Amino acid sequence: MRYRLKLSGIILAMMSMTAAADITFNGFASIRATAADSDGGEPPFSTFKGDGDISFKDESLFALQARADLTEGLSATVQLMAEGINDFEVEARWAYVSYELSDRHRLSLGRFANPIFFQSEYEKVGYAHNFSRLPTAVYIGFEFSTIEGIALDSTFDFDDYVLDTKVLYGNWDGGAFFAVTGQEESFALNDIMSIRATLTYDWWKIFAGAFVAEMDGGSIDQAVLNTFAAPGIAAAQALGATDADVATFQEAVTWTGEDGLYWYSGFNIDYNNWIFDFEYASYQVEDSTDALNNVWYAALGYRFGSTVLTVHTEELTQDIDYDSLSPVQHPVLVATGRAIHDALGAREFDGYGISLRYDFHSNAALKMDYFSGEDTRPTVKDYTIWSVGIDLVF
């Protein structure tokens, strides 16, 4: 679900907030020239629309955030974002109220970031990291990176250690590009329960997080049944499959009612100008045709004054497991289910990249990068991405 707002309405809303309370404005932006090319002819990721030509839209964005201090620990925050990949349509990405329960605990209610991975809460803020884009194998751009719900943020101090935690509950419904059908499909995540923790000590930090949600497969289920399963169901019925056989099969291949499970862990080291990052994540819609996704990246960087040079490698693999088909007995339906598993788990990719960051201003960084990799999809195969741009905060 996205919230598109007219610019005039946004301005009026902000003026109203300013009149009612002390308000602070800040923002961030990325202005980037990018070219993505592949041997198969299609862009390697859905965040690129070009065919190898230079684009000034695909990875450019602008965002403005307003925070109103309503006194006595109560505040309201709105973050408005316009991304080039969406023709710079303005979206209310965050909209929530917060209450400071104490110096250590803050309760928030509304629409805010869903911390799927470690840097999910600020992955759009290019200035906050040293890459031109965070490693795509992990930060692949899920539509449910923002949700509606309630969250508790806490901070605990133990001598020189700091533990930051977040616990949240929420829901999400909307649409996302589904590579198998080649179009946007609708689905929902209900009763999302999430927890994350980061332990920091001087020059290192370790982190982990997880969330579980009940899936509503929406049009993804219909696409699987109507596009992939229908011929197999018809063939099985012609060979004597009963209605009960078909119902068991449909339950085994669809997502509705199943649990979506995500977890991640990793660490960051920043010591004597050396920077090392590692993050691993695993996620799957359990007991369905969704393959188990295992993703990771490792990055090594060195800081030369105002310049940071980073090299990294990343990978996404999918483990296909046919266990969800164990209740299915008819051989034609079993074969159809296995074919659906294979189709939905067919994508894997890896790659290597080099990035250069130069902080030419206290609020802006020039970045250049080159990335190449290999994708198992025949429409992509070997691919390359290069970009030059500026990330800034204000």
Image (spheres, rainbow, N blue to C red):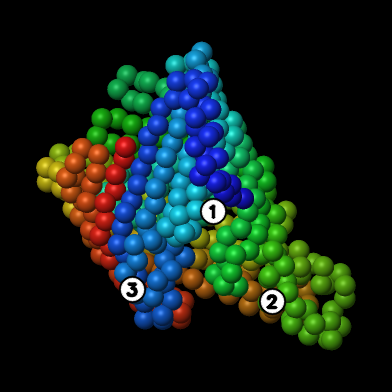
Q: Amino acid at mark 2?
A: Thr
Q: Amino acid at mark 1?
A: Glu
Which numbered disc, 2 or 3, marks the residue that appears first in the sequence? 3
Mark 2 neighbour density, 10 Å: few (under 14) some (14–19) many (20 or more): few
Q: Amino acid at mark 3?
A: Asp
Name, please, the residue furthest toward the top.
72
Cα–Cα gap, marks 3 and 1: 26 Å
User: Which dot marks residue 53?
Assistant: 3
Which numbered disc, 1 or 2, marks the residue that appears first in the sequence? 1
What count of labels does the image hold?
Answer: 3
In this rendering, would 228 be left or right of 112? right
Residue at the spot 48% in from the left edge and 42% down from the top edge: 80
Q: Secondary structure at mark 1?
A: helix
User: Is the C terminus in the top left, top right, bottom left or bottom right quadrant?
Assistant: top left
In this rendering, would 334 be left or right of 386? right
Cα–Cα gap, marks 2 and 3: 33 Å
Residue 128, given in percent of the width and then of the height, sits at 32, 42
User: Which dot marks residue 28?
Assistant: none
> Which one is in front, 82 or 113?
82
Which numbered disc, 3 or 1, marks the residue that appears first in the sequence? 3
In this rendering, would 64 be left or right of 268? right
Residue 248, given in percent of the width and then of the height, sits at 79, 67
Q: Secondary structure at mark 2?
A: helix
Query: Is the residue 390 above or below the residue 43 in the image?
Result: above
User: Which dot marks residue 143?
Assistant: 1
Residue at the spot 83% in from the left edge and 72% down from the top edge: 245
Mark 3 neighbour density, 10 Å: few (under 14) some (14–19) many (20 or more): few
Where does label 2 land, which residue? Answer: 227
Residue 305 appears in the picture as rendered: yes
Residue at the spot 59% in from the left edge and 31% down from the top edge: 109
Name, please, the residue furthest toward the left.
305
